[in-house]
Image (cartoon, rainbow, N blue to C red):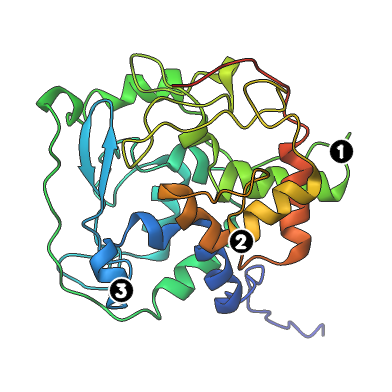
Amino acid sequence: MPVLVAFAYSPPAVAAANVENGKYILTAAGCVGCHTTKANKQKARLLSGGRALKTPFGVYYSPNITPDPEHGLGNWTEADFLEALRNGKSPTGDHYLPVFPYTSYTQMTDDDMRDLWAYMKTRPPISDANIPHAAPFIFRMRFTLGPWKMLNFKPGAFVPDPERDAEWNRGAYLVKALGHCGECHTPRNFMGGLKSDLYHAGAKQGPEGEVVPNITMDADTGIGKWTTDDLDTLLTIRMLPDGDFAGSGMAEVIENTAKLTPEDRKAIISYIRSVPAIKNKVK
C-alpha cells in the first residue's frame, strides 16, 4: 500500500532586509535634506518634516517621516511604503503631490525600497505635526492628479541598458532613481511635469527658490569643459573648477555624495558625462 506523505507549501523566500544598505539608500536619496528643517538638523531631529520647498506653484512643507504613529509613518506597513514610492499613493489611496519626487523614486528596486523601510523603522519617532502647504488651492487638489500622472508619470523600476556597462547603469540608477537630480536640474512645463527634451538643462527655480544650473555637457552653458576630476572634486568637497564652492541646496546634496563609495561617485560621473549636451543658459 503506497504511503502518502503530506508536504507543507512554502512560499518563495524573500531576502531579509539589509538595514545598513537602507541607511546608505537614505543618504543617496537625500531624504534627510528635504524632510528636516535646518534647525532640526542641527539638533539631530532628523526626518521630522517641516522643510519649506519653494516651487513656481507655491511653497510646500515636507512631512514628518519618522516612525511617530500620529504625525509620521508609525502606522504604515512595508506595502504602504512601497506603494508611496512606486506609484505615488498614500495608504488611503490618495495621490501624492509631485513635489514628493516619487516620479523618480518609482525607479528604485524593490530590494532598495525594503531596505530603506527597514532602516527608517530604526529611527526614533518625533512627534512634530505636519505644516499645511502654502500654495493656491488649485495646486493642492489631489483629485486632479490622476490625469496628471497619465501625462507626466511612468511608474516602474529602473531597467538597465544592455548596451551600456555596469558602471554606467549604476550611475544612471543613482542619478535617476535615488539622487533624483533631474527633479531640480530639469525645467517644468505649465503643469509641473518635467520637460524631457531639456533633461538636466537647468531650471529657474529650485527647492530654495534659487536658479539651478545646466549640468549637461554643453561647453558654453553647461559643464562640457569640466573634467572627471572636476566633477569628483565637486561631489566630495564642493569645490568648483574656478576655485569657488557650491552652496545652497547643492551643498546639502554634496553632503550626501561625499558619503557614497568612490565607485558610486565614479558611476555617477560616468552617467552625467554621457547626458547629451543642451545649450540652455539659465538665469
**Depth order, front residue of 256/176:** 256
Is residue 271 shown above or below 223? Answer: below
Marks 2/1: CA–CA distance: 29 Å
Side (left or right) of 83 relative to 267 = left
Q: Amino acid at mark 3?
A: Gln
Q: Amino acid at mark 1?
A: Arg
Relative image position of residue 225 (x, y in whole percent) = 76, 31
How many neighbours does mark 3 have within 10 angstroms: few (below 14), some (14-19), or many (20 or more)? few
Residue at 35%, 41% in the rendered image: 207
Badge 2 marks a residue whose secondary structure is helix
Residue at 82%, 85% in the rendered image: 1
Q: Amino acid at mark 2?
A: Ile
Q: Earlier in the sequence, mark 3 or mark 1?
A: 3
Kindly tell me whether residue 3 is visible in this rendering. Answer: yes
Q: Nearer the viewer, mark 2 or mark 1?
A: 2
Query: Label 3: which residue?
Result: 42
Farthest front residue in view: 243
Marks 3/2: CA–CA distance: 20 Å
Marks 3/1: CA–CA distance: 41 Å
Kindly tell me whether residue 170 is visible in this rendering. Answer: no
Q: Nearer the viewer, mark 3 or mark 1?
A: 3
How many neighbours does mark 2 have within 10 angstroms: few (below 14), some (14-19), or many (20 or more)? some
Q: Earlier in the sequence, mark 3 or mark 2?
A: 3
| Proximity of marks 2 and 1: CB atoms separated by less than 8 Å | no
Q: Nearer the viewer, mark 3 or mark 2?
A: 2
Query: Label 2: which residue?
Result: 237
**Depth order, front residue of 266/228:** 228
Q: Which mark is residue 242?
A: none
